[in-house]
Image: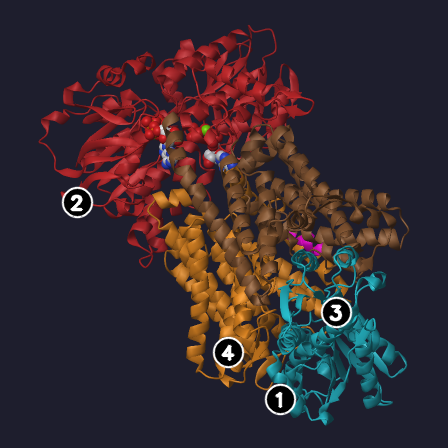
């Protein structure tokens, strides 16, 4: 573990950090070393304590024990600002920017270019524009950040941290909502920064990315340090074993000969369904026991399609049918009533009710479906929550914990549990594996298949094409808010999907793989 | 929930005990109780009795606040409903009078709920409208005078007793139990908390958030109506100019002292009522103390601050975690 | 041409005030005066705004029932510049503004307190008497004056002593609540010999509190209050109240007359037209008083 | 930029309202009424400016009305009873009110308590303190007072642009600049966008909270001084309920109570709209106390509903555009 060949003091040195939240020991005696000019991956399962470590180091949470040294000197930042001033810039896991401020203000908050005590708005916008161009983003920097998609917000957050020109840059799951093209750009920038001697901490659940970019890896498990390795000398299997503490069941085999099976019954169908300015009219058939994948670039209209299908958005034309009977889907309640479920992509704002317990979050949709007058008894609630906590391995396995205190991945599982509890006939999953660790990722994909075998119809959105290919029976490709292509059976592979996405000349450059 | 209650309520119970002890010091006969004309009599009873209007208001208010709303109009609604009850009391039977007054409160609540849930106005301005206009409506009903009545039925609501317990106290207790039964006995409580905690997410989970919001304002209106009727019955007249004046602030204060966040989500009915009692215990203590009235507000300010600090998240463990969680929400 | 008069009324905080407004309207109709009433909702700033808008409308005269005694100089100067006579109703203003208004039709609220105090002193005689006092709103000048007058009256009698004094905000509900706690604090009311309330509404509330405590107001405990609203006479008829000091709601009548005389003949009225502060007790045929007052909009 | 369309709409609503009133009462369309509108609402404009900062930052300040009351009493007593020169009294009260605001901000931040309640306690405290100072109203006869209240630019048509109106306009412009052009202003919006997030982005939330409430109290103190000019007196019951008036003005002006959005210009328009409603009712002059209240409520509703309807209309195509850009 110790690298005695290295003479200079490490850039960032963390020794014996511990942190508890009440009874939960999130970190126990963790060490971590970051050298100048390296890209260091911090890995671990959901809830392993990665984000907590980052927050403790940057002073967001007070620490119970341990020391942090920066360039050999002990530092004890007591706020994010203090950490910044000490030279540690951080992009925290959930996008932590302000949707109400303009993009430019977000980039330069608290460090705007000034003259005579007055913010130089024009200069700030010019710089913002230039900064984002480096990240391949050409947007109106005067518009409120909230107008833009999560992906753009994430890029903005990264750009801000990068531009702070600190000595240490910490990125907590920066790539979770980015597509390949943007990831490429980010990696390019990260390499440049590393060359300049900046140390970078990189958290991700995408192991491909970890192998592509990182020099060394530190693994945490259950709040404890498992080990620190050179990336080059660590095999994937070994890494997964370090993270999970066990072997991972093989998951990557293609879906068993879906085309062999007899065609299933149609669960829900949409004809000429659409909403002007939102997504162009489309035809879509969802069958029991079938997974339909939605693929496309950021902003291609996948989420919009999902919202229309579920009923979260009102269509202005077209006909929806459930089990052959025409229905009106005007609100989420309609969707729920017809046995639909929807896990939205923005889990913090659209998914969880942070203050309520895991149990309450899980039973919420079922309760809403049953109506006010048929409350689930406490016993039923406990039973349901207990079942799903176990089934999805939600950690910590305490149904009475406010869901907001769970790690991101575990929140995602709780959301999934919410809909499974309603025994839906159609489940719409928007980026269900975002921010989920390898173990859970495999779990969720296995679950998707099982559900499907039980007759559930699934509509799944994912930016990870490999993943889509793995479980989809059909893939609908979207471009510019229109459904442009449907692939089925043998035709489903990454190349074909990319070809469909890129068929349009304008999108060509996006498709560099 | 039942398990959490004592832990959550500890600060409030402690505060109440301290204030009661102070009251005992300023007024040695504070805990004396006796039966007077078949009715319990004593300072403690005064606290409960005088506390009923705010306790009733806070029962409705706590639900509104749980949905991240606020209702400034409750004082005015009290005045309206008191005025209606008083004007009808001598010509109609009690059920009719009550139905009219509570119906009016329901309509007021519906109006507020409509503005908030359907038109999407910010609760504080939406209810400010009725706060201003409502008192006018009440005065219109009474034409600015104090409308008195003699109907023994209505008077009984204010001054009567059931097994020695003054009727207002019994009504407040009944409403607490009723509200608790409705809210916790059905799924309403959960759905309200979900709506207040994250309306967008709840909507997507199939919760009828608009219906929830409408419902809580309606209930708040009904509670205010009842408080108004009791206030009128108490003085055997409807004083539209002053009934319920500034009580909305006391009700909000009671809810917050009861530990419910103004940002919605988790709520506790019992603690909100306890909050109302804390306020009234303090008020009665001030009256008994014999200090000149110039000091009233200062004492009130100091006590309120002290009670708040007592339950400050920074000073207690469990609440601290909750608050941290709240802060991390956008 | 008929006169147009703008009346900046304080608000509608009590029955007495409502009566003053409606009596003013009646008096105006009687004299064919066009009366514009602006209700200030108890706020001085609203009264100032109202006066300014009366000036902008060029009315013939302005009546002002000032919510507070100070702070009128600037706006009254404007009225004077616009040559609009101002008459104060019900309450006086600070002496610095003496030359800014035509006349003031008011009662003397210190005197009202004195009348109440003197009645009590006479009724009690040499007996020792513990008095509890229900004050008006803290900071209201009427409350301060009525307290002052009463205090001076009883200061001459060593046997009279105010043992408790709290604000009842001029309202029935608060009057009742405060009286309840007075009773508890003074040995179940046995130590109290008389209640003095700054207005009748509080007294009506206090009477209820005494009755509920098993006391006999008017007999066990003497009552004296101010305003002479109808309900206090009802209590007197029932033997539950002893005395009240009248504050007439008809301030506008004399004011109209003064303005008319000034406009037509240039007669300058006296600076202060004081209304009478009549003492009314159970001996003064309360039933008749009640009947005559109940239609006045109290 | 961000706040502009709603502000424009509010302005249109104001102009249309003014025109409608002027049709009914031609006297309203005079410089005198406009001058009065500014003078009479000067103190409200000043507190509302401070309230705008507080509300944009996601807070609320219920103590401002009481601070005004306290200020008037303090200033009056200082000048008339304690013989302090007016300027010294002004400086003293401004320092005192700023300290009061800072204390409120500190309590809110350090103990993590809801601003609504802390400032409610502050409201009791300041009002209670002014009762202790004096329950009588105290006239102020210092020469500065008559000089200031007599001072006015005459406008054509008999209107007066008074000194206090000018003070208000200056503070207003200062507020606009402070909010729009400085780092402080950006941080105010940041706080309203989310305290935790702002803190993670390096904004010193604690210091900002203290500064914001300090600013609000300071402006309330200033409004108190203006109020004392307005009435030449100090009175413990003055400016009761002004906190609600100013909150209403801020919200009518398009500022979100949830924080993060709004503007000082909007607030100014909100103040004028409220003033308009009152002027209209005064001109009408036939309304009883109760109809005054009902009419105020109805007009408030009409203005807000109209404004919200227009904003919703204006937003609809904008939303599509925003979606399309990403
Ligand atoms: N504010 C908090 N209060 C209480 N417990 C917390 C808090 N934040 C995190 N935890 C707990 O600490 C543990 C570590 O969480 P952390 O967010 O660090 O995990 P992570 O490794 O970042 O996971 P993920 O990959 O899902 O983001 C979890 O059990 C979580 O429930
Ligand atoms: N609920 C919503 N309300 C308003 N706008 C939304 C909503 N959901 C998505 N959008 C907007 O739609 C645009 C992106 O479209 P969409 O989310 O459909 O893209 P996508 O293909 O799903 O890509 P991704 O989900 O990976 O960002 C963004 O501007 C986003 O803000
Ligand atoms: Mg994490
Ligand atoms: Mg999407």
Q: CA distance from mark 1 to mark 2?
A: 74 Å
What type of secondary structure mainly makes up the magenta span? helix
Instruction: Determine whether the residue tagged by mark 3 lies in a helix, strand or loop.
Output: helix
Mark count = 4
Q: Which residue is mark 2?
A: A326
Whether residue B115 is visible to the viewer of this picture, yes or no, is yes
Q: Is residue A226 above or below residue C51?
A: above
Marks 1 and 2: same chain?
no
Q: Nearer the viewer, residue A98 or D83?
A: D83
State which chain is coloured brown: D
Chain C colour is cyan
Q: Which residue is mark 3?
A: C263
Residue C294 belongs to magenta span: no
Establish if A21 lies above or below C223. above
Color used for chain A? red
Marks 1 and 3: which is nearer the front? 3
Q: Position of residue A357 (x, y in %)?
A: 43, 45
The magenta segment is D120-125
- Inter-mark Cα distance, 1 to 3: 36 Å
- The answer to whether marks 4 and 1 sit on the same chain is no
Dot 1 or dot 3: first in sequence order is 3
Q: Which residue corresponds to mark 1?
A: C291
Count neighbours of disc 4 (C-alpha within 10 A) and say few if under 14, some if 14 to 19, many if 20 or more. some
Q: Is residue B6 visible?
A: no
What chain does badge 4 belong to? B
């Amino acid at each position: 573990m110790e690298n005695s060949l290295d003479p200079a003091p490490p850039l960032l040195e963390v020794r014996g950090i511990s942190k508890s939240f009440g009874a939960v020991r999130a970190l126990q005696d963790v060490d971590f070393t970051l050298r100048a000019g390296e890209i260091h991956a911090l890995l671990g399962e959901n809830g392993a304590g990665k984000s907590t470590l980052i927050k403790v180091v940057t002073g967001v949470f007070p620490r119970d024990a341990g020391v942090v040294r920066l360039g050999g000197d002990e530092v004890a930042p007591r706020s994010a600002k203090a950490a910044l001033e000490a030279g540690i810039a951080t992009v925290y896991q959930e996008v932590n920017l302000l949707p109400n401020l303009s993009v430019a203000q977000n980039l330069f908050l608290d460090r705007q270019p000034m003259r005579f005590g007055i913010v130089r708005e024009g200069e700030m916008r010019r710089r913002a524009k230039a900064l984002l161009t480096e990240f391949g983003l050409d947007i109106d920097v005067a518009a409120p950040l909230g107008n833009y998609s999560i992906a753009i917000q994430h890029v903005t957050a990264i750009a801000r941290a990068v531009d702070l020109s600190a000595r240490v840059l910490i990125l907590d799951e920066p790539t979770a909502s980015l597509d390949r093209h943007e990831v490429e750009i980010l990696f390019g920038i990260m390499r440049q920064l590393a060359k300049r001697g900046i140390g970078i901490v990189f958290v991700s659940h995408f192991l491909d990315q970890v192998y592509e970019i990182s020099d060394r890896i530190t693994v945490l498990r259950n709040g404890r340090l498992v080990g620190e390795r050179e990336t080059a000398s660590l095999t994937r299997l070994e890494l997964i074993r370090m993270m999970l503490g066990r072997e991972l069941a093989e998951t990557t085999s293609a879906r068993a000969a879906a085309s062999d099976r007899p065609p299933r019954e149609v669960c829900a169908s949409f004809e000429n369904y659409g909403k002007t300015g939102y997504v162009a009219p489309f035809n879509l058939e969802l069958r029991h026991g079938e997974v339909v994948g939605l693929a496309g670039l950021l902003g291609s209209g996948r989420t919009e399609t999902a919202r229309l299908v579920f009923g979260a958005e009102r269509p202005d034309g077209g006909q929806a049918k459930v089990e052959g009977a025409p229905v009106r889907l005007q609100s989420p309640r309609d969707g729920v009533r017809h046995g639909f479920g929807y896990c939205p992509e923005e889990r913090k704002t659209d998914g969880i009710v942070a203050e309520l317990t895991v149990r309450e979050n899980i039973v919420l949709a079922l309760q809403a479906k049953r109506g006010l007058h048929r409350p689930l008894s406490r016993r039923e609630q406990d039973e349901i929550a207990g079942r799903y906590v176990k089934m999805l391995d939600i950690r910590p396995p305490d149904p009475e914990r406010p869901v907001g205190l769970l790690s991101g991945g575990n929140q995602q599982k709780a959301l999934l549990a919410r809909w499974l509890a309603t025994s839906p006939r159609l489940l719409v999953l928007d980026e269900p594996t975002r921010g989920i660790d390898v173990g859970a990722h495999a779990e969720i994909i296995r679950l998707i298949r099982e559900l499907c075998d039980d007759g559930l119809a699934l509509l799944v959105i994912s930016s990870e094409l490999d993943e889509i290919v793995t479980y989809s029976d059909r893939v609908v490709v979207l471009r510019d808010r229109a459904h442009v292509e449907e692939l089925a059976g043998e035709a489903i592979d990454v190349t074909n999907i990319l070809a469909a996405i890129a068929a349009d000349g304008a999108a060509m450059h996006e498709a560099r793989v | 929930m039942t398990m959490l209650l004592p832990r959550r309520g500890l600060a409030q119970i402690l505060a109440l005990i301290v204030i009661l002890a102070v009251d005992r010091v300023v007024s040695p006969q504070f805990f004396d109780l006796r039966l007077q004309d078949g009715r319990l009599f004593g300072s403690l009873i005064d606290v409960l009795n005088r506390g009923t209007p705010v306790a009733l208001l806070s029962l409705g208010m706590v639900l509104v606040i749980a949905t991240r709303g606020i209702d400034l109009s409750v004082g005015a609604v009290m005045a309206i409903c008191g005025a209606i009850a008083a004007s009808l009391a001598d010509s109609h039977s009690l059920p009719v009078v009550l139905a009219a007054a509570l119906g009016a409160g329901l309509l007021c609540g519906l109006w507020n709920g409509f503005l908030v849930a359907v038109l999407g106005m910010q609760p504080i301005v939406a209810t400010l409208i009725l706060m201003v206009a409502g008192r006018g409506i009440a005065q219109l009903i009474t034409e600015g005078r104090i409308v008195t009545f003699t109907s023994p039925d209505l008077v009984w609501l204010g001054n009567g007793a059931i097994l020695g317990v003054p009727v207002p106290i019994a009504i407040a207790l009944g409403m607490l139990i009723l509200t608790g039964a409705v809210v916790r006995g059905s799924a309403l409580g959960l759905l309200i908390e979900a709506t207040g905690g994250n309306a967008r997410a709840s909507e997507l989970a199939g919760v009828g958030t608009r219906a929830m919001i409408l419902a809580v304002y309606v209930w708040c209106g009904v509670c205010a109506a009842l408080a108004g009727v009791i206030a009128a019955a108490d003085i055997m007249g409807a004083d539209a100019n002053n009934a319920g004046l500034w009580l909305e602030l006391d009700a909000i204060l009671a809810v917050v002292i009861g530990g419910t966040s103004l940002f919605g989500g988790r709520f506790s009915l019992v603690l909100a009522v306890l909050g109302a009692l804390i306020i009234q215990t303090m008020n009665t203590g001030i009256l008994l103390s014999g200090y000149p009235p110039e000091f009233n507000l200062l004492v009130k300010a100091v006590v309120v601050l002290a009670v708040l600090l007592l339950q400050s998240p920074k000073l207690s463990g469990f609440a601290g975690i909750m608050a941290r969680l709240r802060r991390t929400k956008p | 041409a008929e006169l147009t008069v703008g009346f900046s009324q304080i608000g509608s905080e009590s029955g007495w005030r409502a009566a003053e407004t409606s009596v003013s309207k009646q008096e105006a109709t009687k004299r064919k005066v066009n009366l514009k009433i602006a209700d200030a909702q108890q706020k001085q700033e609203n009264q100032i705004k109202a006066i300014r808008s009366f000036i902008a409308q060029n009315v013939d005269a302005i009546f002002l029932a000032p919510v507070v005694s100070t702070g009128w100089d600037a706006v009254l100067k404007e009225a004077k510049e616009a040559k609009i006579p101002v008459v104060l109703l019900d309450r006086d203003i600070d002496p610095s503004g003496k030359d800014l208004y035509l006349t003031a039709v008011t009662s003397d609220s210190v005197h009202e307190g004195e009348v109440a105090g003197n009645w009590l002193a006479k009724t009690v005689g040499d007996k020792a008497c513990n008095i509890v006092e229900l004050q008006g709103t803290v900071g209201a000048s009427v409350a301060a004056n009525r307290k002052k007058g009463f205090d001076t009256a009883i200061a001459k009698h060593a046997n009279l002593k105010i043992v408790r004094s709290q604000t009842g905000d001029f309202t029935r509900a608060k009057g009742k609540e405060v009286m309840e706690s007075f009773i508890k604090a003074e040995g179940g009311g046995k130590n109290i010999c008389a209640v003095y309330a700054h207005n009748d509404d509080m007294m009506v509330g206090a009477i209820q509190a005494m009755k509920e405590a098993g006391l006999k107001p008017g007999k066990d405990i003497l009552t004296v209050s101010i305003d002479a609203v109808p309900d206090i006479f009802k209590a007197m008829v029932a033997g539950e109240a002893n005395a009240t000091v009248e504050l007439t709601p008809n301030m506008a009548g004399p004011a109209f007359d003064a303005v008319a005389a000034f406009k037509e003949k240039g007669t300058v009225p006296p600076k202060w037209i004081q209304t009478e502060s009549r003492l009314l007790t159970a001996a003064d045929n309360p039933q008749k008083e009640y009947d005559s007052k109940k239609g006045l909009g109290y | 930029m961000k706040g502009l369309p709603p502000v424009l709409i509010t302005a249109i609503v104001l102009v249309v309202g003014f025109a409608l009133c002027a049709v009914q009462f031609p006297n309203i369309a005079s410089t005198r009424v406009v001058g009065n509108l500014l003078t009479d609402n000067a103190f409200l404009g000043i507190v509302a400016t401070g309230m705008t900062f507080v509300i944009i930052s996601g807070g609320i300040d219920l103590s401002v009305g009481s601070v005004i009351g306290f200020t008037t009493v303090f200033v009056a007593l200082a000048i008339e009873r304690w013989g302090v020169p007016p300027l010294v009294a002004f400086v003293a009260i401004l320092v005192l009110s700023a300290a009061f605001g800072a204390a409120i901000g500190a309590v809110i931040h350090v103990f993590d308590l809801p601003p609504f309640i802390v400032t409610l306690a502050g409201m009791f405290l300041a009002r209670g303190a002014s009762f202790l100072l004096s329950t009588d109203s105290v006239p102020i006869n210092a020469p500065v007072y008559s000089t200031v209240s007599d001072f006015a630019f005459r406008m054509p048509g008999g209107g007066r642009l008074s000194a206090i109106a000018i003070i208000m306009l200056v503070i207003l412009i200062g507020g606009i600049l402070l909010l729009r052009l400085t780092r402080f202003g950006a941080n105010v919006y940041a706080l309203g966008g989310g305290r935790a997030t702002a803190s993670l982005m390096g904004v010193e939330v604690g210091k900002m909270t203290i500064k914001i409430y300090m600013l609000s109290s300071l402006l309330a103190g200033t409004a108190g001084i203006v109020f004392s000019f307005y009435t030449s007196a100090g009175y413990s019951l003055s400016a009761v309920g002004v906190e609600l008036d100013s909150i209403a003005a801020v919200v009518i002006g398009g500022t979100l109570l949830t924080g993060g959005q709004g503007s000082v210009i909007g607030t100014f328009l909100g103040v004028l709209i409220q003033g308009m409603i009152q002027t209209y009712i005064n001109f009408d002059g036939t309304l009883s106390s109760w109809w005054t209240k009902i009419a105020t409520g109805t007009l408030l509703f009409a203005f807000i509903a109209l404004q919200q309807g227009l904003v919703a209309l204006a937003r609809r195509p904008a939303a599509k555009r925003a979606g399309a850009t990403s």
